Amino acid sequence: MVYPALGVPPYDLSGYERVMELIEKERGRIVAIGEVGLDFWKGRRENWELQRRVFEGFIDLAKSLDLPIVVHSRSAGKYALEILFSKKIERVVMHAFDGRAAYAAKAAERGFMFSIPPSVARSSQKQKLVRRLSLDSLLLESDAPVLSPIPGEPNHPKNIRVSAEWISRLKDLPLEKVVERTTENALRVFDLQLKV
């Protein structure tokens, strides 16, 4: 089963108006808006005002259409969360969040979800995030071809199992429980029914 989400990455905002129009037109066929957000990695902060304005526009659109939003916040986690908090949006997935676990905990208290990529195998930051947050706040993600468990190698969707195994290990929980709960979390945030 594949469920689409539509958005534009904050590091290439060309055509974002057309994407917003497409989201409105196809709102009955998509399950989320995203990835959208902020990206301050490697000097990308120079267009901060445009990134912020577009991000806020997508947040407003998500709220008006009652869709969850999937947030890209590379090197900008604190700023993205501040904007999300100020906009009072509730259905949020923080994609591969690279910010501090303390910020994440405040967002999790508001019901935000955090997706954990296979790079958790090599990232102390992601491991801290998993330890700090409850299983009810976690999702699995594959993020191919980047965020591989092995530096320099392309990632593959099958590595989503690596995410589940690391969450299981870090939380000292059975793998089956991690898979079951993260699936339930995904179904809930994206308002889906599992069809077997």
Image (cartoon, rainbow, N blue to C red):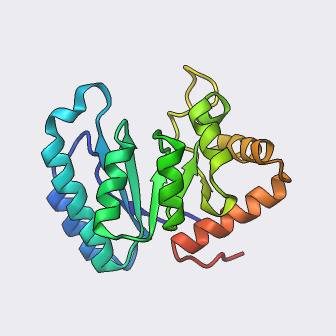
Pinpoint residue 173: horizontal percent, then vertical percent.
83, 52
Asked whether, in this view, residue 7 is left or right of residue 100, the answer is left
Asked whether, in this view, residue 59 is left or right of residue 3, the answer is left
- Nearer-the-camera pick, 115 or 85: 85
The N terminus, quarter of image: bottom right
Pinpoint residue 31: horizontal percent, then vertical percent.
44, 70
- Nearer-the-camera pick, 29 or 61: 61
From this viewpoint, is residue 89 visible? yes
Residue shown at the point (53%, 77%) measured from the top left: 191
Residue shown at the point (72%, 75%) measured from the top left: 196
From this viewpoint, is residue 158 visible? no
The quarter holding residue 136 reads bottom right
Residue shown at the point (28%, 51%) measured from the top left: 8
Q: Residue furthest right?
A: 174
In the image, residue 147 above or below residue 58: above
In the image, residue 87 above or below residue 15: below
Pinpoint residue 134: horizontal percent, then vertical percent.
66, 58
Pinpoint residue 22: horizontal percent, then vertical percent.
24, 67
The quarter holding residue 46 reads top left
The mark total stands at 0
